[in-house]
Image (cartoon, rainbow, N blue to C red):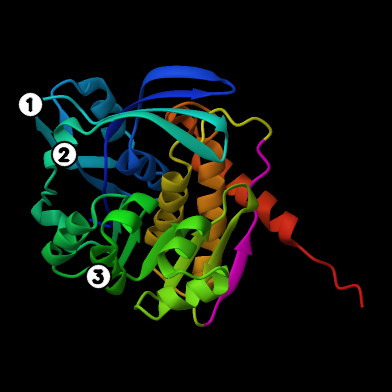
């Protein structure tokens, strides 16, 4: 499998200034997979309850997403309820782990040697378990959040030591490293082992940082944000999908991946759930990347 994504599959109730939607289908694995499917074939590893609609599974399968690693077990699917009074930050009103509480990732045989493995925002012990199961991955990337930084920092540190790319937001990287400056924080992450750290900064874009690279990507100018849920996951999905499509990883490809991740995330936030992202053609993503290129173009003035 070219790209394997491990993470949550959820049903959300979301309210934003643009409205609200109940039973909105999401989860880190779903958002990342739908974004990545614009570029390459994807295998998803997760768990759902027997209440998860088969119709949604069929939609995913029809979009280059292999569900051999999606386990269906008796019980209810993971549910999350939140409100965005500030579009940069969700307020969680209710979390019901349900079948996700006992999630133990099971990887089909053809998932065991992926070109790229993405570990979504799940318990660090589960991330370590998956890493131990894959025979050889060309690249391993992971995401995390402040909950794991608070509750399992030592396990998270062990995960970071084993990955090539860490996706993390600005507040979280400062919290984890104890550094107030994001570049000092980036150095602290690189010292643990990753080749690249991708620092997400919300409406201020994202930074790709390594020992040889410092690159900034602005956000794509979206006029009306409907639902920010899954923005970081769709960014990672677009980013890694681009790398999987070209099967090459160096500083120049990382720069381009930043723009493709930004473009897919910009599409995702224009609707509730993954509706807008699902209907978007690859050509529209490319057009948005071209717009980002033009925004970054500078003319020498001296």
Q: Position of residue 292 (x, y in %)?
A: 67, 53
Q: Secondary structure at mark 1?
A: loop
Is 181 magenta? The answer is no
- Asked where in the image residue 115 lies, by quadrant, the reply is bottom left
Q: Residue at x 26, y 49 (%)?
A: 122
- Asked where in the image residue 270 lies, by quadrant, the reply is top right
In the figure, 53 relative to 267: above or below? above
Label 2: few (<14), some or many (≥20) within 10 Å? few
Of callouts 3 and 1, the N-terminal one: 1
How far apart are labels 3 and 1 at the CA level? Answer: 32 Å
Query: Circle 1 sits on which residue?
Result: 74
Asked whether the residues under the numbered discs 1 and 2 touch, taking CB atoms below 8 Å apart as contact, a structural biologist would say no
Q: Secondary structure at mark 3?
A: helix
Label 1: few (<14), some or many (≥20) within 10 Å? few
Which of labels 3 and 1 is toward the front?
Answer: 3
Q: Position of residue 60 (x, y in %)?
A: 30, 33
Q: Which mark is residue 101?
A: 2
- Image quadrant holding the N terminus, namely bottom left
Asked whether the residues under the numbered discs 3 and 2 touch, taking CB atoms below 8 Å apart as contact, a structural biologist would say no
Query: Circle 3 sits on which residue?
Result: 158
The magenta span reads 212-222
Which of labels 1 and 2 is toward the front?
Answer: 2
Q: Position of residue 248 (x, y in %)?
A: 41, 70
From the image, give the main secondary structure of the stretch colored magenta. Answer: loop
Q: Is residue 72 visible?
A: yes
Q: Which mark is residue 153?
A: none
């Amino acid at each position: 499998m070219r790209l394997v994504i491990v993470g949550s599959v959820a049903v959300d109730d979301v309210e934003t200034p643009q409205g609200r939607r109940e039973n909105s289908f999401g989860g880190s694995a779903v958002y990342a997979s739908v974004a990545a499917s614009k570029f390459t074939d994807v295998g998803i590893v997760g768990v759902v309850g027997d209440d998860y609609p088969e119709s949604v599974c069929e939609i995913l399968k029809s979009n280059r997403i292999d569900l051999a690693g999606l386990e269906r077990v008796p019980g209810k699917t993971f549910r999350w309820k939140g409100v965005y009074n500030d579009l940069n930050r969700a307020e969680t009103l209710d979390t019901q782990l349900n079948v996700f509480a006992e999630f133990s990732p099971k990887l089909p045989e053809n998932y065991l040697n992926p070109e790229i493995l993405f570990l979504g925002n799940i318990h660090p012990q589960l991330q370590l378990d998956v890493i131990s199961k894959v025979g050889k991955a060309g690249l391993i990337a992971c995401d995390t959040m402040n909950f794991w930084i608070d509750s399992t920092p030592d396990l998270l540190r062990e995960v970071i030591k084993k990955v090539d790319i860490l996706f993390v937001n600005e507040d979280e990287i400062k919290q984890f490293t104890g550094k107030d400056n994001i570049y000092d924080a980036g150095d602290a992450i690189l010292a643990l082992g990753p080749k690249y750290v991708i620092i997400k900064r919300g409406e201020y874009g994202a930074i790709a940082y390594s020992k040889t690279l410092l690159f900034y990507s602005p956000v794509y100018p979206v006029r009306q944000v409907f639902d920010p849920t899954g923005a970081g996951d769709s960014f990672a999905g677009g980013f890694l999908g681009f790398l999987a499509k070209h099967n090459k990883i160096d500083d120049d490809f990382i720069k381009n991946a930043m723009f493709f991740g930004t473009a897919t995330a910009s599409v995702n936030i224009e609707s509730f759930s993954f509706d807008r992202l699902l209907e978007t053609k690859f050509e529209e993503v490319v057009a948005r990347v071209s717009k980002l290129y033009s925004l970054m173009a500078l003319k020498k003035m001296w």
